[in-house]
Amino acid sequence: MIGYYVAYPPAAEEWAEKVNEAFAAAGLCNTQDAAHSGKEALRLADFLLLVVTERAQAELPDMRNAWEFFENEIRWRRKPHGEILFIAPDESVLVNLPLRLKKYGYYLMTEAGDAAAYCKDAYQTAQESAAREKKEMPPVKEIKYSPAAESVPQIKFSVRAPAIKSFDK
C-alpha cells in the first residue's frame, strides 16, 4: 500500500483536510492513522506532502522537522524511492524555499487528485525499477585454488621436539 504523510501548519488545516480526502479517495494510505508517533509515520510514508499557504510556512519548526527528517531518509538511502511534494494555492508561495527543497515538485490545491495519481504512478515505476535492479544475473564462474606442483615444503615445528643441547656440557 502506498503511504503518505501530510505536514501542514495550523493555518492550512482546512486545505490539508481536502488534500487528505483526495488522497484517501484515490486509495492511498495516510501513515499518520496507523503510526504511534510522528517519526514512525514519516518512516512508513512513501510521500511527504507539505501543504503550505504562505511563503514562511515551510520554515516553521514542525514543518522543518518533518521535511528534514524525510529528506535525510531519502539522502541516506533508507527511503530510496521517497519523494516530497508541495501542495500550494499558487506558485508564488514556493518562491523562497530552502535550497534543499527546490528540487522537489508541487501541485496546486485544486490539483490534489492529480497529485494522488502522480504518487500512484511514481510508486509503481519505482517498484518496477527496483524489481529490474534485483533481476538475477547469470552465475559467475569462480577460479578454484590449487597449490603449485613444485612448492617449497614449509618447516615443521613441533612442541615435542627434543630440546636443544647447549655447548657447555
Image (spheres, grey):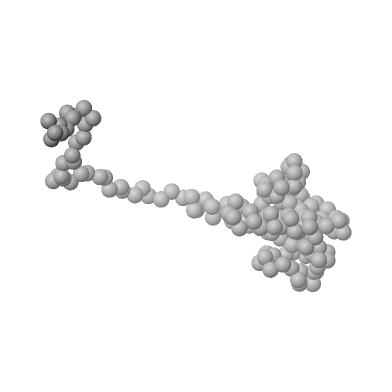
Asked if residue 153 is positioned above or below residue 61 in the image, the reply reads: above
Q: Position of residue 26 (x, y in %)?
A: 73, 51
Q: Do we see residue 110 in this rendering?
A: no
Residue 62's quadrant in the figure?
A: bottom right
Which residue is at 66% across, 52% downward? 46
Q: Position of residue 79 (x, y in %)?
A: 61, 52
In this rendered view, identify the residue nearer to me: 160 or 106.
160
Q: Position of residue 29 (x, y in %)?
A: 72, 47
Numbered-mark total: 0
Q: Do we see residue 42 in this rendering?
A: yes
Which residue is at 71% across, 60% downward? 85
Which residue is at 16% across, 45% downward? 151
Q: Position of residue 28 (x, y in %)?
A: 71, 49
Which residue is at 83% across, 64% downward? 53
Quarter of the picture containing the C terminus is: top left
Residue 155's quadrant in the figure?
A: top left
Q: Residue furthest front?
A: 168
In this rendered view, identify the residue nearer to me: 115 or 158.
158
Asked if residue 152 is positioned above or below residue 55 in the image, the reply reads: above
In this rendered view, identify the residue nearer to me: 165 or 135.
165
